[in-house]
Amino acid sequence: MSGATTAVALGQQTELIKDKTIGYWTKRADSFSETRHEELHSEQATYWRTEIAMNLQLQKGMKILDVGCGAGYFEAILSPFGCRMTGVDLTPEMIAQGKTLLERHQIEAELLVMDAEHLEFPDASFDAVISRNLTWNLPRPDKAYQEWHRVLKTGGVLLNFDAEYAKNVSRCDQSKNKAHEMLSQDTLDECNMLYRMLAVSALDRPVWDAQVLAQIGFTDIVTDTTVSERIFPVENQFYIPDPMFSIRAVK
């Protein structure tokens, strides 16, 4: 897909997609939160802490924005480092579940309902922006990246984890996808509908992401397509077969 065509396609995405995304994740919020609770008490949390610490110099008082925070998982696993965590998510029910999960574990963090493409923070508010499995949901991931750049301090780090989930429906053995194991066929169909609606599903990622980040002004951009080997070394109850990638960039 050419750059011009991509810009037009992304620009044609509508608020209808966001409404459908909110509806989809509202339905999944309860079970999603419980899975994250179980994940906190498993070796998976250690895998994620190690991966994040490889990319961020985690320090007490460091201000981190978790975009698409869901049920507050990153807020919980990074709490031992003493970081000042703020999480935002478009789905109100996810934020409600996240607050419950953090209260359940006596963890302090600020969770807010907010659009990843229209952040309500001043410029240069955060030392790092982190995200997991969000950008595939976004009608305008390019616009989101611009916002994330805006709210980062100079020298701040963006760390994004995602996968080409739409393409992997046919490329990967989805019978091994523990994240989708308990979903009804109607919910799976709804997820596949979102894949088809989103222009990001057709992009060559993370190559496209790196190009956009460079255009925005990020530097020291590094993509890593071996993340799954470290995050999912065994096919446990949290395993997903889709190869994850990470993107690390500096403002």
Image (cartoon, rainbow, N blue to C red):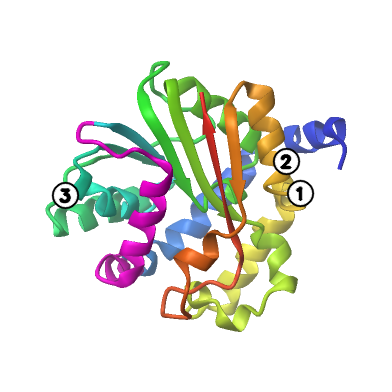
> In the rendered structure, which disc, 1 or 3, sits on the residue that comes first in sequence?
3
**Image point 38% across, 58% down: which residue?**
48
Residue 123 position by quadrant: top left
> Can you give x and y, in whole percent of width and height, for residue 230 in the image?
47, 65
Point out the stretch of residues depicted in magenta.
Answer: 34-61
* Residue positioned 16% across, 49% down in the render: 107
Residue type at mark 3: give it.
Answer: Ile
Whether pointer 1 and pointer 2 mark residues with C-beta atoms closer than 8 Å, the reply is yes
Q: Secondary structure at mark 1?
A: loop
What is the chief secondary structure element of the magenta stretch? Answer: helix
- Local SS, label 2: helix
Residue denoted by label 3: 107
Image marks 2 and 3: residues in contact by CB distance under 8 Å = no
- How crowded pointer 2 is (Cα within 10 Å; few <14, some 14-19, many 20+) is rated as some
Where residue 204 is drawn, which disc sits there? 1
Alpha carbon separation for disc pair 1 and 3? 38 Å
Contact flag, marks 1 and 3 (Cβ < 8 Å): no
Q: In terms of depth relative to the viewer, which is nearer, 51 or 72?
A: 51
* Kind of residue sitting beneath label 1: Asp
**Image position of 241 with respect to 141: above or below:** below
Q: Quadrant of residue 111?
A: top left
Q: Amino acid at mark 2?
A: Trp
> Which is more N-terminal, label 3 or label 2?
3
Nearest to the observer: residue 141 or residue 51: 51
- Residue 81 at x, y = what percent? 22, 45
Q: Which residue is mark 2?
A: 208
Residue 118, horizontal then vertical, whole percent: 50, 28
Q: Distance from label 2 to label 3 (Cα)?
A: 36 Å
Q: Is residue 217 above or below residue 86?
A: above
